[in-house]
Image: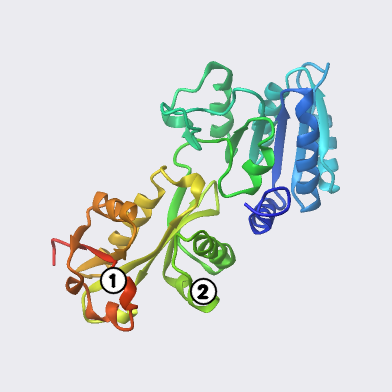
């Protein structure tokens, strides 16, 4: 978090850019939520996002085809399109399905889904979960081609749409993301993700040049279409001839922590190293929680001299006294 309404400007700018030229439908359950929706919708529209806001009103029934075309024209003009309906959620759901928008956002009380521990569930795969009765129509919406449905509590709309942490629940049909290699089109966003990890202290400080040097060897978890939510890299150049690669720059943004993203990233990196014919992968850390995570991913703690000697060339002595090393070997080698 930072300035600009409590939201980090870089995070806000990233999401505004990611949503550009896409169509979003907002459904506000209460009149008291309209002002919040209008503020966010206006900001999105100014950034080239097409927004339809549906508010409580007396209108009933389906929206006619001609009205949909009028709403579409208004969105293209650079302003939010507004519509009132006695059932904003039902109307928004119907329009999202008919028009295959990118995202449906519902704002209201008791929408956000809670886990057994009482914490907000950031993601729910609707294909593998039974939704509460009032939300079951959303499964059909997602099957129709809508990328995601965001359920948001009043007051949390900007945080949900413009921050890495989010505030509500994102519904998707099937897995909510995939791990893939970084391409040129991803470099700016992934570099920002790496800087964010450094700023928060999850990744050790690196210069911009060093951070950008990680990009070509990075694997990234892209969520909700193409939003980078986690990153890991395999470093091989210093260890040529050793048969090993180092797992480095592992970071997952807060909203995705605990959702299995880190495990999927590590699994993908290890498998890539295996396919490349290496003997194994190693990692080092001073963090006890990260150490436990590596063990849970199948790594075994080893003595420092059990990893390539090149790792310790120029390594700060004060850090070496505290660091722990972990390694996974491939049985076929």
Which residue is at the far bottom? 314
Q: On the picture, is 272 further left or further right than 68? A: left
Q: Position of residue 79 (x, y in %)?
A: 85, 44
Residue 181's quadrant in the figure? bottom left
Question: Residue drawn 29% across and 72% down?
Answer: 320
Label 2 element class: helix
**Could you classify mark 2 by the number of other residues whose Cα lies within 10 Å: few (under 14), some (14-19), or many (20 or more)?**
some
Give how far apart the Cα atoms at labels 1 and 2 are.
Answer: 19 Å
Q: On the picture, is 54 further left or further right than 160? A: right
**Mark 2 = which residue?**
212
As displayed, is residue 319 above or below residue 31?
A: below
Q: Marks 2 and 1: in contact by CB < 8 Å?
A: no
**Mark 1 = which residue?**
245
Earlier in the chain: of badge 1 and badge 2, it is: 2
* Quadrant the C terminus occupies: bottom left
Q: Position of residue 202 (x, y in %)?
A: 45, 59
Question: Residue drawn 55% across and 53% down?
Answer: 226
Q: On the picture, is 130 further left or further right than 92? A: left
Question: Residue drawn 84% across and 48% down?
Answer: 78
Q: Position of residue 54 (x, y in %)?
A: 77, 29
């Amino acid at each position: 978090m930072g300035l600009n309404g409590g939201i980090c400007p870089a995070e806000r700018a990233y999401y505004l850019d990611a949503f550009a030229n896409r169509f979003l439908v907002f459904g506000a359950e209460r009149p008291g939520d309209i002002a919040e929706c209008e503020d966010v919708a206006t900001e999105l529209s100014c950034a080239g996002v097409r927004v339809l806001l549906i508010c409580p009103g007396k209108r009933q029934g389906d929206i006619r085809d001609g009205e949909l075309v009028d709403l579409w024209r208004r969105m293209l003009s650079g302003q939010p399109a507004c519509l009132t309906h006695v059932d904003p959620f039902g109307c928004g759901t119907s329009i999202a399905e008919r028009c295959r928008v990118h995202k449906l956002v519902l704002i209201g009380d008791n929408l956000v889904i809670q886990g057994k521990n009482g914490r907000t569930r950031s993601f729910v795969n609707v294909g593998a979960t039974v939704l509460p009765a009032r939300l079951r129509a959303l499964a059909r919406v997602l099957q129709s081609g809508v990328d995601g449905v965001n359920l948001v509590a009043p007051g949390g709309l900007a945080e949900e749409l413009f921050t890495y942490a989010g505030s509500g629940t994102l519904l998707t049909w099937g897995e909510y993301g995939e791990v893939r290699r970084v391409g040129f089109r991803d470099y700016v966003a992934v570099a920002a993700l790496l800087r964010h990890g450094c700023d928060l202290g999850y990744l050790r400080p690196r210069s911009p040049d060093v951070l950008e040097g990680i990009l070509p060897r990075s694997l990234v978890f892209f969520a909700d279409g193409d939003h980078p939510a986690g990153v890991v890299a395999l470093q091989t150049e210093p260890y040529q001839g050793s048969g090993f690669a180092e797992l480095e720059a592992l970071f997952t943004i807060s909203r995705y922590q605990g959702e299995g993203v880190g495990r999927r990233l590590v699994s993908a990196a290890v498998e890539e190293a295996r396919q490349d014919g290496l003997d194994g992968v190693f990692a080092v850390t001073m963090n006890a929680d990260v150490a436990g995570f590596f063990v849970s991913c199948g790594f075994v703690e080893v003595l420092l001299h059990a990893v390539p000697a090149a790792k310790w060339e120029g390594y700060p002595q004060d850090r070496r006294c505290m660091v722990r090393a972990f390694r996974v070997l491939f049985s076929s080698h």
